[in-house]
């Protein structure tokens, strides 16, 4: 058996759903794209050179000859209603959380390669989607996600550079979207999908839920108009994938329950997330969500926004309590949320707190909320 066959068999055996190979040549279409969209990415300008570096796998492994691309279908179990429309399916499957299923599979796979004498290197900044398309195991949808034939777009992509020539066919990127379909672009709540195959991360709800304020190069604020458009999304956003006809078959399947998620559902209420203490965050929340989040305040902010968007007056006491949280960011968004909910109790909570609030940012948010009420 060839090394390619051994690799494929092993990957499928331990739970990956697709395996492909492509050369370690630079992903130049991505390079051109980054050059053309230089201005759109000016916020990342300090790291722009580094961003351009992702184009060439040689920057990951100078002796790299091929890229192995693995897909893992992360939507194999039912999502409890408590999480639907609130947390992206990719995060519910914990693919990126330390010591969970996917990282364990990657570890196994890497040690298999190493036992075969293959040198392997990975970087979180690999252009995974371009690699999957070039390896012929997925096509780009107009929503910029990769669609694996027979699975859909709910896939995690893992790519690694290796020092072996692995035979893979060469594929052209294909547009397999249904003729004239624009459903994803039309459904995107923020216009982040501003044209087919183009997405502006600074408008994307999903990106805002974990990137804004958290990544040093990203503007610290989720714009007010975006907060409203986040709707019920606390972490991630699946709108442009959920409306896609290529995912509809998958959504109709009667998937088995996920015992872990069902256990978590009762614990992950929005008020609890808003008011969580360090222990709940470090033991339950942080290991569960994508490790990009480094501080609980970002998730508390998201919880405040979503509670504000519910318009539910039962959230007022929780938001009022959040006005006492030392983190300015959380108080600011709790004030915004109270303004969204409105009504006498919200107004009273805001007025009462205004007298004691020392942060000018929070005071400004309270004043705006009171004016809008
Ligand atoms: S994830 Fe949500 S906000 Fe981002 S592009 Fe898709 S629909 Fe738009
Ligand atoms: S919704 Fe339509 S345009 Fe968007 S990715 Fe799916 S098929 Fe393509």
Image (cartoon, rainbow, N blue to C red):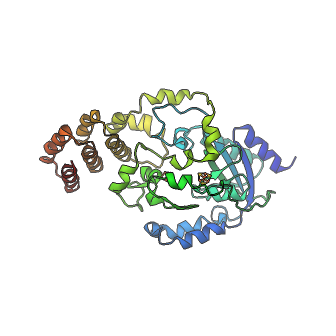
Q: Nearer the viewer, residue 173 or 218?
A: 173
- Residue 348 locus on image (x, y percent): 15, 40
Q: Is residue 153 above or below residue 318?
A: below
Tell me if I can see residue 291 in this picture. Answer: yes
Residue that sits furthest to the front in the current view: 180
Q: Is residue 325 above or below residue 220?
A: above
Residue that sits furthest to the right in the current view: 1
Q: Residue at x 78, y 48 (%)?
A: 116
Q: Nearer the viewer, residue 229 or 211?
A: 229
Residue that sits furthest to the left in the current view: 355
Q: Residue at x 66, y 56 (%)?
A: 179
Q: Residue at x 56, y 29 (%)?
A: 258
- Residue 75, quarter of the rendered image: top right
* Count of numbered circles in the view: 0
Tell me if I can see residue 160 in this picture. Answer: no
Q: Nearer the viewer, residue 172 or 177?
A: 177
Q: Residue at x 38, y 54 (%)?
A: 226
- Residue 42 locus on image (x, y percent): 45, 70
Side of 333 where 78 appears, left or right: right
- Residue 172 locus on image (x, y percent): 73, 62
- Residue 160, quarter of the rendered image: bottom right
Q: Is residue 84 above or below residue 219?
A: above
- Residue 249 locus on image (x, y percent): 65, 39
């Amino acid at each position: 058996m060839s090394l390619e066959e051994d690799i494929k068999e092993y990957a499928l055996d331990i739970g990956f759903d697709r395996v492909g190979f492509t050369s370690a040549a630079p992903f130049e279409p991505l390079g051109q794209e980054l050059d053309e969209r230089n201005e759109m990415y000016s916020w990342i300008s300090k790291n722009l050179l580094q961003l351009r570096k992702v184009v060439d796998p040689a920057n990951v492994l100078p002796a790299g000859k091929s890229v192995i691309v693995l897909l893992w279908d992360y939507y194999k179990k039912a999502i409890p209603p408590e999480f639907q429309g609130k947390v992206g399916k990719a995060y519910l499957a914990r693919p990126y959380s330390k010591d969970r299923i996917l990282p364990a599979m990657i570890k196994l796979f890497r040690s298999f390669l190493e036992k075969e004498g293959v040198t392997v290197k990975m970087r979180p900044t690999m252009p995974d989607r371009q690699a999957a398309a070039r390896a012929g195991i997925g096509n780009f949808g107009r929503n910029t996600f990769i669609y694996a034939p027979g699975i859909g777009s709910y896939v995690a992509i893992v790519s690694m550079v290796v020092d072996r020539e692995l035979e893979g066919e060469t594929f052209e990127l294909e547009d397999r979207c249904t003729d004239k379909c624009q459903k994803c672009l039309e459904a995107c709540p923020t216009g982040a999908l501003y044209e087919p195959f183009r997405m502006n991360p600074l408008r994307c709800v999903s990106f805002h839920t974990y990137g804004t304020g958290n990544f040093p190069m990203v503007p610290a604020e989720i714009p007010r108009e975006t907060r409203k458009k986040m709707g019920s999304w606390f972490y991630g956003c699946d709108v442009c994938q959920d409306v896609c006809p290529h995912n509809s078959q998958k959504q109709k399947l009667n998937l088995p329950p996920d015992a872990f998620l069902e256990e978590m559902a009762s614990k992950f209420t929005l008020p609890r997330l808003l008011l969580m203490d360090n222990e709940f965050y470090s033991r339950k929340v942080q290991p569960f969500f994508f490790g990009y989040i480094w501080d609980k305040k970002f998730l508390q902010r998201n919880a405040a926004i979503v509670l504000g968007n519910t318009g539910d007056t039962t959230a007022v006491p929780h938001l009022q309590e959040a006005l006492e949280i030392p983190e300015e960011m959380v108080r600011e968004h709790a004030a915004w949320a109270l303004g969204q909910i409105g009504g006498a109790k919200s107004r009273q909570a805001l007025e009462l707190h205004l007298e004691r609030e020392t942060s000018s940012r929070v005071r400004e948010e309270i004043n705006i909320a009171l004016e809008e009420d």
